[in-house]
Image (spheres, rainbow, N blue to C red):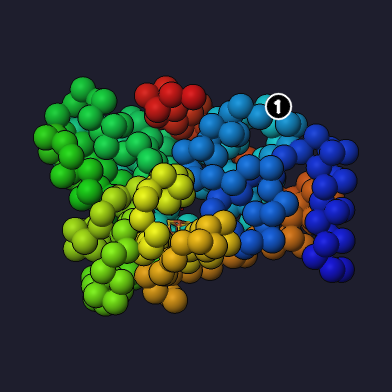
């Protein structure tokens, strides 16, 4: 079937089933075009909570759909491709986290949303790239175990006086953006504003004009007087900004900055998801209740 026909059928089924499609900025262009809402991890959590739909089709990776299901258990949350995961989320397990907690009994656990429901359930509070500094500074404890992203954790540690125990996890997409890639782009385009995602390495972040979540990058491009930008995150956002602002110039950090898990979500898989109610996310209730506490605390401090 042609893309346009699939998109029409998706639209019809969404209405029939009272479903919405939520998408992250890193999915394919045609997927974002059928979505009701496209955003960063924090705004997607809020959209899941605020939606009146019965069904949420999550165009993103597993932890995102799981977070929506934890926050809104009365809705059916579907992930169109069951193995669309986040390798960073798999870099921390409950067992390893419990061992770390034993080593630092006075530390609170702050857990990046890029983590499993079970790890969230072991944590005191969640954060996203948009609110990590505020979340860490909001808690009482002077000591924090920050899981799983060492780069985001290192960025946070520069903006707090709390003692941060970093976890050795990372996002391969952002960690592969090198200082050399960026320095070359900056030399070639000295007037360009470099907007970097905090999952990038510390030496890359040192070169940034602004360090922002994906939504933060979109907003900064809108309000900046600059006409040129180096977009330090997954390449789909660069493509989107280029289409949206044809009067401005954009440079991608590297051709390799692609999240292949996000790209697993296709129009065909979304259509199948709505036709067959696949693949429904189920979080065991005892895990869900604890994980929800950590997510709720984050949503509370970030406002609605
Ligand atoms: P944000 O959505 O918070 O910008 O994070 C990007 C990301 O890597 C999500 O997996
Ligand atoms: Fe995970 Fe990185 Fe892909 Fe985000 S971009 S889902 S952190 S691998």
Instruction: Judge by depth and name the residue closer to the eye, 208 or 250.
Output: 250
| Quarter of the view holding residue 37 | top right
* Position of the N terminus by quadrant: bottom right
**Residue 105 in view of the camera:** no
Residue at the spot 41% in from the left edge and 38% down from the top edge:
120
- Residue 139 relative to residue 271: left or right: left
Instruction: Judge by depth and name the residue closer to the eye, 243 or 48.
Output: 243
- Residue 118 relative to residue 39: left or right: left
Q: Position of residue 88 (x, y in %)?
A: 40, 57
**Residue receiving disc 1:** 52
Q: Secondary structure at mark 1?
A: loop
Residue at the spot 35% in from the left edge and 36% down from the top edge:
131
Q: In the image, is residue 171 above or below residue 198?
A: below
Q: Position of residue 80 (x, y in %)?
A: 69, 54
Residue at the spot 30% in from the left edge and 31% down from the top edge:
135
Q: In the image, is residue 126 above or below residue 211?
A: above
**Residue 145 in view of the camera:** yes
Instruction: Judge by depth and name the residue closer to the eye, 77 or 201.
Output: 201
Indicate yes or no: mark 1 CB to ligand 1 under 8 Å. Answer: no
């Amino acid at each position: 079937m042609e893309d346009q026909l699939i998109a029409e059928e998706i639209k019809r089924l969404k209405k029939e089933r009272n479903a919405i499609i939520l998408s992250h900025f890193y999915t394919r262009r045609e997927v974002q075009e059928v979505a009701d809402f496209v955003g960063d991890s924090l705004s997607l959590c809020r959209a899941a909570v605020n939606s009146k739909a019965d069904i949420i089709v999550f165009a993103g990776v597993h932890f995102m759909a799981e977070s929506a299901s934890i926050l809104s258990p009365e809705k059916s949350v579907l992930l169109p491709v069951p193995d669309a995961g986040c390798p960073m989320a798999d870099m921390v397990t409950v067992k390893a986290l419990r061992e770390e907690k034993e080593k630092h009994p006075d530390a609170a656990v702050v857990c990046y949303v890029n983590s499993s429901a079970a790890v969230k359930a072991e944590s005191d509070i969640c954060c996203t790239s948009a609110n990590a500094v505020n979340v860490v500074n909001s808690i009482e404890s002077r000591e924090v175990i920050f899981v799983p992203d060492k780069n985001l954790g290192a960025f946070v540690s520069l903006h707090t006086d709390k003692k941060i125990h970093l976890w050795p996890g990372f996002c391969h997409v952002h960690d592969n953006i090198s200082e050399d890639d960026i320095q070359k782009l900056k030399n070639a385009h000295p007037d360009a504003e470099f907007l970097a995602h905090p999952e990038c390495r510390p030496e890359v972040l040192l070169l940034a004009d602004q360090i922002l979540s994906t939504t933060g990058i979109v907003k900064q491009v809108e309000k900046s007087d600059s006409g040129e930008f180096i977009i330090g995150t997954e390449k789909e956002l660069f493509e989107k900004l280029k289409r949206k602002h044809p009067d401005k110039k954009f440079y991608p950090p590297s051709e390799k900055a692609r999240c292949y898990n996000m790209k697993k979500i296709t129009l065909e898989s979304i259509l199948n998801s709505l036709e067959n109610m696949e693949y429904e996310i189920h979080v065991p209730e005892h895990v869900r209740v604890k994980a929800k506490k950590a997510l709720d605390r984050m949503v509370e401090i970030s406002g609605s």
